[in-house]
């Protein structure tokens, strides 16, 4: 049961991490001093990379244990989120 809870929480955090920027595009554009179109292109580029690499990575990881692969990916997402959380804040309002 604890493994299932970890998987559930990990999947929730992973999906939230991927979808969160969509609601923050305007704030991200203002904070980075770029147009909203440029930030939209950034998110679109990420989506295209995810779409194009999904099948090849699935085929390449076909022989790996899915549970270990999922935990490794959740660890990478966790590390990325922690790095983003401790990164310097350039927001002038802060």
Image (spheres, rainbow, N blue to C red):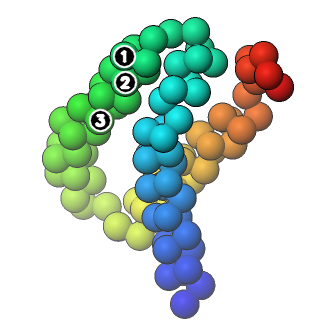
On-image quarter of the N terminus = bottom right
Q: Quadrant of residue 82?
A: top right
The front one of 17 and 68 is 17
Residue 86: x %, y % from top left? 76, 34
The front one of 87 and 71 is 87
Q: CA distance from mark 3 to mark 1?
A: 15 Å
Q: Residues within 10 Å of mark 3 (few under 14, many from 20)?
A: few
Look at the numbered discs 1 and 2 and tell me whether their residues touch, using CB distance below 8 Å.
yes
Q: Secondary structure at mark 3?
A: helix
Q: Nearer the viewer, mark 3 or mark 2?
A: 2
Using the image, tell me which numbered label, if any, was put on residue 40: 2
Using the image, tell me which numbered label, if any, was put on residue 37: 1
- Which is nearer the N-term, disc 3 or disc 2? 2
Residue 29: x %, y % from top left? 53, 19
Q: Residues within 10 Å of mark 1 (few under 14, many from 20)?
A: few
Q: Secondary structure at mark 2?
A: helix
Residue at (48%, 29%) from the top-left corner? 25
- Which is nearer the N-term, disc 3 or disc 1? 1
Q: Quadrant of residue 42?
A: top left
Residue at (43%, 47%) from the top-left corner? 19
């Amino acid at each position: 049961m604890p493994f299932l809870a970890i998987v559930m929480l990990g999947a929730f955090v992973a999906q939230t991490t991927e979808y969160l920027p969509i609601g923050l595009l305007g704030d991200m554009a203002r904070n980075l001093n770029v147009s909203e179109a440029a930030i939209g292109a950034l998110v679109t580029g990420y989506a295209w990379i995810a779409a194009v690499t999904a099948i090849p990575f699935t085929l390449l990881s076909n022989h790996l244990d899915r549970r270990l692969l999922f935990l490794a990916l959740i660890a990478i997402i966790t590390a990325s989120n922690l790095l983003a959380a401790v990164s310097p804040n350039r927001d002038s309002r802060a």
